[in-house]
């Protein structure tokens, strides 16, 4: 079963735009790693409805065939060390990768992140509310289908250091389509209920291969 990895770098604001370009460039060799399925770098356009595109914050997104492939490289492999050596000057702190296993009905997340924009929802320390989160997410997916939105969906739960963390992804043609659909009654209400179960962080991201 494929494993989706997200890294949210902690950047020095004054060199964030350079950091985005550097990570995009220096992470390309990851595609040669054994077990890697895809690699994307995503420019964060919005965070919790605020336009932060000018801050050049970003997310590194990888997919692995299994967790063991990830741990073969992280954190001690020379290839990973070379990557960090090239980008560490842009970082203001250590960012820990988070691994997510897809829920049973999902597989690879690539179809979602390869849309025009991706709406990424993430909640930590869900605890006993796991069932509520899954239920609210399924109702959101149903509402999207009723609207005939054509959006791609994916959801998963964290592994290892990310255990207890949930993420849900919605892939859209563009921001205009996203805003139009999520503002409609049934979808808006379902999305609100997902966010109300636990403290959800919401990002709108444009990923690039």
Image (cartoon, rainbow, N blue to C red):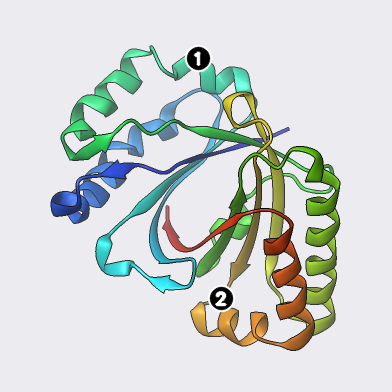
Residue appearing at x 83%, y 52% in the figure = 132
Decide: is 133 above or below 36: below
How crowded is the residue under tag 2: few (<14 C-alpha within 10 Å), some, or many (20+)?
some
- Which residue is more in the foreground, 191 or 41? 191
Q: How far apart are marks 2 and 1 (CA)?
A: 35 Å
- Which residue is more in the foreground, 31 or 79? 79
Callout 2: SS: loop
Would you identify the image quadrant in which residue 108 lies? top right
Which label was assigned to residue 173?
Answer: 2
Residue appearing at x 29%, y 19% in the figure = 81
Which residue does the numbered mark 1 point to in the structure image?
A: 72
In this rendering, would 19 be left or right of 201?
left
- Which residue is more in the foreground, 1 or 157? 157
Image position, residue 41 (x, y; %): 40, 50
In this rendering, would 77 be left or right of 157?
left
In this rendering, would 77 be left or right of 192?
left
Image position, residue 53 (x, y; %): 32, 68
Decide: is 137 above or below 75: below
Image position, residue 187 (x, y; %): 75, 78
Decide: is 166 above or below 34: below
Would you identify the image quadrant in which residue 94 lies? top left
Counting residues from the start of the chain, the first of labels 2 and 1 encountered is 1
Q: Do the residues labelled 2 and 1 touch (CB within 8 Å)?
A: no
Callout 1: SS: helix
Q: Where, quadrant-wise, is the N terminus in this rendering?
A: top right
Disc tally is 2
How crowded is the residue under tag 1: few (<14 C-alpha within 10 Å), some, or many (20+)?
few
Image position, residue 74 (x, y; %): 44, 19
Residue appearing at x 86%, y 47% in the figure = 131
């Amino acid at each position: 079963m494929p494993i989706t990895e997200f890294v949210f770098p902690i950047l020095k604001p004054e060199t964030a735009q350079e950091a985005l370009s550097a990570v995009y460039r220096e992470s390309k060799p990851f595609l040669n790693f054994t077990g890697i399925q895809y690699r994307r770098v995503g420019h964060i356009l919005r965070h919790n409805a605020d336009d932060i595109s000018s801050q050049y914050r970003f997310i590194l997104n990888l997919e692995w065939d299994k967790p063991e492939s990830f741990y073969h490289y992280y954190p001690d492999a020379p290839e990973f060390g070379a990557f960090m050596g090239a980008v560490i000057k842009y970082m203001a702190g250590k960012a820990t990768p988070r691994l997510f296993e897809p829920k049973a009905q999902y597989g690879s997340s690539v179809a979602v992140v390869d849309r025009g924009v991706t709406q990424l929802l993430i909640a930590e320390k869900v605890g006993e509310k796991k069932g509520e989160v899954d239920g609210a997410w399924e109702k959101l997916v149903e509402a999207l289908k009723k609207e005939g939105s054509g959006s791609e969906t994916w959801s998963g739960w964290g592994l290892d250091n990310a255990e207890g963390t949930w993420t849900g992804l919605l892939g859209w043609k563009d921001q205009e389509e996203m805003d139009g659909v999520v503002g409609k009654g049934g979808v808006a209400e379902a999305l609100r209920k997902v966010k109300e179960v636990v403290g959800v962080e919401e990002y709108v991201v444009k990923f690039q291969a």
